[in-house]
Amino acid sequence: MIHDLSKQNMKGISQLFFAVLITCSLGSCVTYDSLVNFNEAPGIPDQPQSITNYEPIVIQPNDILEIQINSANAASVQPFRTNSSSEGGNGFLVNSEGNITFPTLGKIPMKGLAVEAAADTLLKLLDPYFEQEPIVSVRLANFRINVNGEVNNPGIFPVQNERVTILDALSLAGDFTSFSRRDSIMVIRERDGVRTFGHLDLNSTDVFNSPYFYLQQNDVVYVRPAKTKTNAVRDPATRVIPWISVIASLTVVAISIIRL
């Protein structure tokens, strides 16, 4: 008889123990769907899609252009180097009027040009000075993205590749935290004296068609926190109370076992 009662008590205690653990888990964990990207129906399409929302990076005031000129005749390149250059690579600041000042050639308009178009412009201006057509390359030397908010490693990140997506930016910042709102990402963009705000939802595959999916130089990416973190920060006791309840419940379980 006593043995049967002990078995019943142990069964009841075990059920209580697991109930406590489940309650704690439900009260302290975020949902699975909130941790998964692109989980909205109908999901990721099976067929290839055309990319229509990519816009080439265009040069803006305060950009720094790295310009390289190469030729079979090294002496012919010398007049187009600055005093500080050694291998033909130069950093040229685009002034507020959108121009750069280039050795020998003087002021050259660059604002609004894609880097490929800027290279073509320089090539046409340089061609009369060379017996053989030189090789000209242009790239942005100060392409950077600011990622902050609910990410693991917020900061300002230099980017070598001028074709960068919101997913690339999040990877640079160490991805989301457990408290990130994947459906509420803001991109702040400035161009030609105008500031715009884009909103991205990584729960939906529609994000791939957004004009803000591909980032521009100096974009600011902000990931909003979930309400669960907001509540915890506002009332720190909410982070402690669940664990106090767990400890108290486990203490009751332990005492019950000892008294058997």
Image (spheres, rainbow, N blue to C red):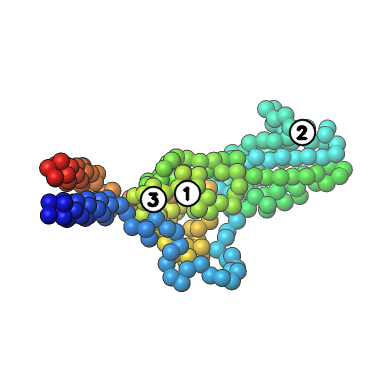
The quadrant of the image that shows the C terminus is top left
Relative depth, front residue between 69 and 256: 256
- Circle 2 residue: 79
Residue assigned mark 3: 223
Q: Read off the residue under disc 1.
A: 170
Amino acid at pointer 3: Val
The kind of residue on which mark 1 rests is Leu
For marks 1 and 3, give the CA distance. Answer: 9 Å
> Quick check: 67 left or right of 248?
right
Instruction: In the rendered view, tell whether residue 208 sits above or below residue 244.
Output: below
In the image shown, does 78 or 188 lie closer to the viewer?
A: 188
The residue lying at 75 percent from left, 48 percent from top is 123
Picture residue at 50% right of the left edge, 58% below the top: 213
Q: Is residue 158 visible?
A: yes
Give the spatial CA distance, label 2 vs label 1.
43 Å
SS at mark 2 in the image: helix
Which label's residue is closer to the chain start, 2 or 3?
Answer: 2
**Which quarter shows the N terminus?**
bottom left
